[in-house]
Amino acid sequence: MGKKQKQKIILPPELPPEILEDEIEVSDEDLQFVSENRDYAGFVSRLDTHSITKHVTRVADVKEDDLEALYEKRLRKTSVLKENEDKGLQLDPVDALPVKTLDGKLYYRTRPKPENGGDENEVGEGEKDGGGNEGIIKLTKAERRAKLKKSKKEAKKEGKKLSKPEEAEQAPQVAVLAEVKEDLTAEELFESKKCKLAELGMALLADPESNIKSLKEMLQIARDDNPSISKLGFLSLLAVFKDIIPGYRIRLPTEKELEMKVSKEVKKMRFYESTLLSAYKAYLQKLIASEKQPVFHQVVVRCICNLLDAVPHFNCCEILLEVVVRNLGSQDVVVRKLCCATIKSLFTNEGKHGGVATVEAVRLIANHVKVKNCQLHPDFVEVFMSLSFDEDLQRREVPDDKSKVKNKKNNKRKSIEEPSQLQQNERKKNKKELMLKTREEVAAEYKAASLAPDVMEKRRMQTETISAVFETYFRILKHTMMFTAVSSEANASSIGGASGAHPLLAPCLKGLGKFSHLIDLDYIGDLMNYLKRLAGGGSSNDGPSQKNSNHLTVTERLRCCIVAFRVMRNNLDALNVDLQDFFVQLYNLILEYRPGRDQGEVLAEALKIMLCDDRQHDMQKAAAFVKRLATFSLSIGSAESMAALVTLKNLLQKNIKCRNLLENDAGGGSVSGSISIYQPYAMDPNLSGALASVLWEINLLSKHYHPSISTAASSIAGMNSAHNQVYHAILSPQQAFMDLLLERESFNSKSDTQKSSSRRKRGNGTSILANTELSSNMSGSIDENEVSKKLGDHFMLLRNIKENERLRDELDRATLSLHLYDEYKQQKKTGSTKTKKCKKLLIA
């Protein structure tokens, strides 16, 4: 056996050098933590460091004497190394970090030891001890840290000083460059998305079935945060959907149909239809969500209106109709006109949807009128004027009476026959039943496949439309009656003076006049009573009252009279109603008419329907209207005067005895009637006694400044009471009004100036009319108001009697004051002479 090898003893690593308490830096956070947790940190002061070091430096299975010898050897080696290092090198273990070589060894960077002792701070204590330049004393850790902090701060300050002027110069340039880059990127993004929309749209239009998935990408672009991109997306999708939507409603397959095995073509078609329908619904949801935003309102409404106009038969038509009907009363004029045009297009082009959209639109409008209590824009009801109804639907389906009679006779003959061949008859019946069933099935399939609409279904939809329309009209009339009744009781005539309280009355009356032939006879009596009360201004009495006449405008009351006459003429065979009350209302409304406030075309229409179209008139009533129209023509515009003169001439042509009013005999000759004195302020034309007057107004109108009116008045004045004369009416009051209205806009004084120049050449002298024509020649055009003012003296007509009386009273007062002043002067003179005489007597 060999010798036992000596066991190698490995000593533990050296402990870190002890640091003085003065050199230890404790942060404020540590102090605060220890002060707050003294109970937990108290054990630190009671630690036995000596026993801990002894425990750490021990080595197992080694005697203490051997350990002490080994520690002494280690101390000698470390002391020798320090002496060698101190001779030529100096190590700063805090400032210099160790470097690790490729072999894995660590060494510190060193620097040569200064001969003169280095810095003043490092040599302070050596000089005190008498060491001088023998060695360098190291700085404390706190001093070294402070020194490092100072050097870093100085370096930062120098760097800031150098960078500040450069940054100041480059700051505006950098900001501008950043903005330009952002703008360029935004424009590039906008152009890229725009090009993407165009590419996807063109691909869809070229081959919809293969590129149907592109709809989702276009929808994603339409959901962009940029409003411009979203608008482009909406419009692009609109163009695509208008082109690729089929001409039928898409019905998705049921669960049972999906379980069935089908061909590839059917699967492809199902996928195409389902994808198209889901994308279309998502598009509509996005449009409706964006409608409330003012930025997208017009674009969204335009897209919805175009879709409804192009594909009213497709799915989700009810959603589109609801949006369009809701915007019929929009404050935006563009949106309102667009929605009205769309609804009118639906009503006129029922072939696109078979009348289903018409029924739904009318129902929605009726519900809106009901919910809003008739306080809506007039366009809500105005669109009903575009409806058209087929009056021959009921006539086509009326069964023939002859066929019914033949069937009854055949049934009687069969019942009389003897029951000898019952079996053969049963077989024949069974065969006939089978044939009838097969025929019915074939007819049903043919109707489903054919494009022609079912007559019964069309009749049902038309009945629903008519009932909804007239329900709306009667609701408006009822609301107007209730409003006028309440306002008359409250004496609130100022509220009802304008049509703002019942804005739907005018289009309602227009619609009743147009569709009056479709009204059921059971409701016509009530309708005539309502119209009579409304024509009187909403009063329940027969005669018009001044309080109630302010609730409706003159135009609305005239429309009530027009509708009443149209209803009566369309149902003349079934009704016998006295229209005298409406003549009384017209007679009084002529004087209440104001050219700037009321509509002249409505007045002309009322004159035509009530006076010109009626064949026979009572002589007293006709004379009253002739006199009232002649007086009316003196104080209104030229267009209204022309309509009144045309009506007056028509009445004189039909009533020969009324031509006696053109004679100069005061009292109307021998046909003055029971009333011998003319009463111009009478409410009833039959009680006015117009036959006892003379048409002196025609003489004034023959000198009217407008040549058309003067010629018309002259032609009326030339009529006489001969029975053999026949006059043919060429113009109607409406046509005369419109012709003169258009002529008034382009009315100039070229012809008048030529007349004035010819008069001057003839030497007839100058007159007031020539002076006015000369001044108009200088200006180039005639203003009707100015001419009427200048010709007031020429006509020598005092239109206002009260004004004349006031002027006479002022003249009488002036003369009386002058007379009193003269008397006062005379009395003063006589008094002065008497005083002079008295003075002379006193002096004498």
Image: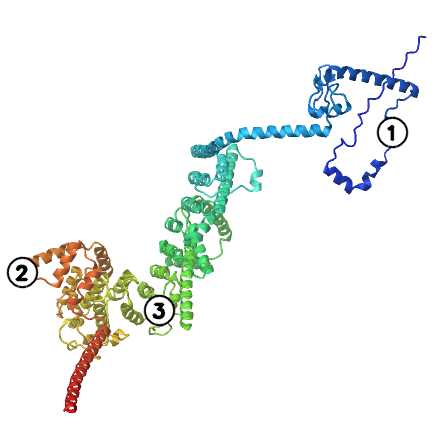
Picture coordinates of residue 600 (x, y %)?
27, 61
Whether residue 327 appears in this view of the structure is yes
Q: Specify the label residue 763 is tagged with.
A: 2
Q: Secondary structure at mark 2?
A: loop
Q: CA distance from mark 3 to mark 2?
A: 55 Å
Measured in 3D between alpha carbons, the distance from the residue under mark 3 to the one under mark 1, in whole angstroms, is 118 Å
- What amino acid is found at the position of numbered circle 1 in the picture? His
Q: Nearer the viewer, residue 396 or 756?
A: 756
Residue 397 placement (x, y as % from top left):
39, 55
Q: Where does the image place residue 554, in percent across and percent down from the top left?
A: 32, 66
Q: Residue at x 77, y 24 (%)?
A: 129
Q: Quadrant of residue 627?
A: bottom left
Q: Secondary structure at mark 3?
A: helix
Q: Position of residue 757 (x, y in %)?
A: 9, 56
Residue at 25% across / 66% down in the picture?
611
When asked about the image quadrant of residue 399, the answer is bottom left
What is the quadrant of the C terminus in the image?
Answer: bottom left
Q: Amino acid at mark 2?
A: Gly
Sequence order check, earlier mark of 3 and 1: 1
Q: Are marks 3 and 2 in contact (CB under 8 Å)?
A: no
Query: Splitting the image into 4 quarters, where does residue 404 fall?
Result: bottom left
Residue beneath disc 1: 50
Q: Earlier in the sequence, mark 3 or mark 2?
A: 3
Circle 1: is it few (<14), some (14-19), or many (20+) Cα within 10 Å? few
Instruction: Residue lying at the far right in this picture: please name it.
Output: 1
Q: Residue at x 82, y 16 (%)?
A: 77
Residue annotated with mark 3: 550
Q: Secondary structure at mark 1?
A: helix
Q: Nearer the viewer, residue 51 or 129?
A: 129
